[in-house]
Image: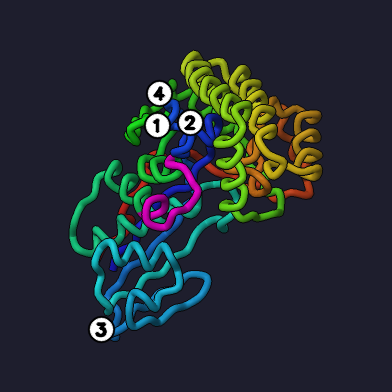
Amino acid sequence: MIVSSAPFRVSFAGGGSDIASYYRRQAGAVLSCAIAKYSFVIVHNYFNENKYHLKYTRTELADTLEDIAHPLLREALRMHRVEPGIEVASVADIPSGTGLGSSSSFSVALINALYAHRSRFASKDHLAEEACKLEIDILKEPIGKQDQYAAAYGGLNFIEFNSNGGVNVQPVVLSSEKMAELESNILLFFTGSQRDTRSVLSTQVQAMETDEDKFRTVERMVQLAYEMRDILMSGDLGAFGEALHRGWMMKRSLTSQITNSTIDEFYDAARAAGAVGGKLAGAGGGGFLVLYCPKDRQPKVRQALSQLKEIEFRFDWSGARIAFAQ
């Protein structure tokens, strides 16, 4: 039996520039961190050698790959030429549709588990590349590449997306004291709504492809990602929080689907209570509100957002890994 895990991620800046319609014209970049919330995949030989037994939010018992309804499972098993007689189960710390890259975390964990099931090792870079191939090339999902690399590598990274499709992952190195301060000053609150990421992202992609002003907005968001990387490395965490706010103001101008009046009220209340800056995680439209708030102001922010569920977390430094093998 194999138990594989891959972390979720929080993106701080540059989202949207990891999509091909942007980086084919101009190199993109994002600043993000992996968090210690995970997607887990269990792979085990199945007693019935003629069946695929798949367990996620529903259970499937299939005779052939074509009979499998779950697209990621079906195509990953096809990529790896997995024959019947296998059982695959998945669980996660946080539900999908919340802006933390859950789909790509699942893809990376699944691919790693399938390699380990055959006693093969796959590098973090290979896991990310194959997850991108699975989600973007094969399933034609309207998503970018940042989530797969964040899930595979873990840590706090600056990730660049080149016009030729290549990806560079650069760890952001801070002192242990500054890293601990950054970690403790980031808060996550669930807004109570999940959304269809495909719909939100499709609208953003269309905006970038048809509206030059929107493309230039993403270009400024990429420039801000570089600025925020440098701010972090200088140790000025207050300026990091302020830049996070500027980035959110840019992102929310891309399409009307990114935010709504309820989310704006939550964000404004958090800022009024002492949060320096923040944003919605992921594409927007719901999910998690990410805030940068110094520790002494956090009680007031928590009080202002008392109706929301806060998720406590730490950074993940391992990335994708095989947690158990027997």
Give whichever of 215, 42 is nearer the camera. Answer: 215
| Kind of residue at badge 4 | Val
- Tell me which residue sits at (45%, 56%) in the image: 39
- Is residue 58 at least partly visible in the picture? yes
Query: Separation of disc 4 and disc 2 at Cα?
Result: 16 Å
Indicate how the structure is coloured in the image: rainbow
Residue 109, x across and y down, in percent: 37, 55
Q: Is residue 117 above or below residue 190?
A: below
Sequence-earlier tag: 3 or 2: 2
Magenta highlight range: 134-145
Crowd around label 3: few <14 · some 14–19 · many ≥20 (10 Å): some
Residue 36, x across and y down, in percent: 48, 46
Residue 304, which numbered label?
none
Contact check, label 3 and label 2, Cβ < 8 Å: no
From the image, tell me which residue sits under label 2: 30
Sequence-earlier tag: 3 or 1: 3
Contact check, label 4 and label 3, Cβ < 8 Å: no
- Tell me which residue sits at (42%, 25%) in the image: 172
| Kind of residue at badge 3 | Glu
The N terminus, quarter of image: bottom left
From the image, tell me which residue sits under label 3: 49
Contact check, label 2 and label 1, Cβ < 8 Å: yes
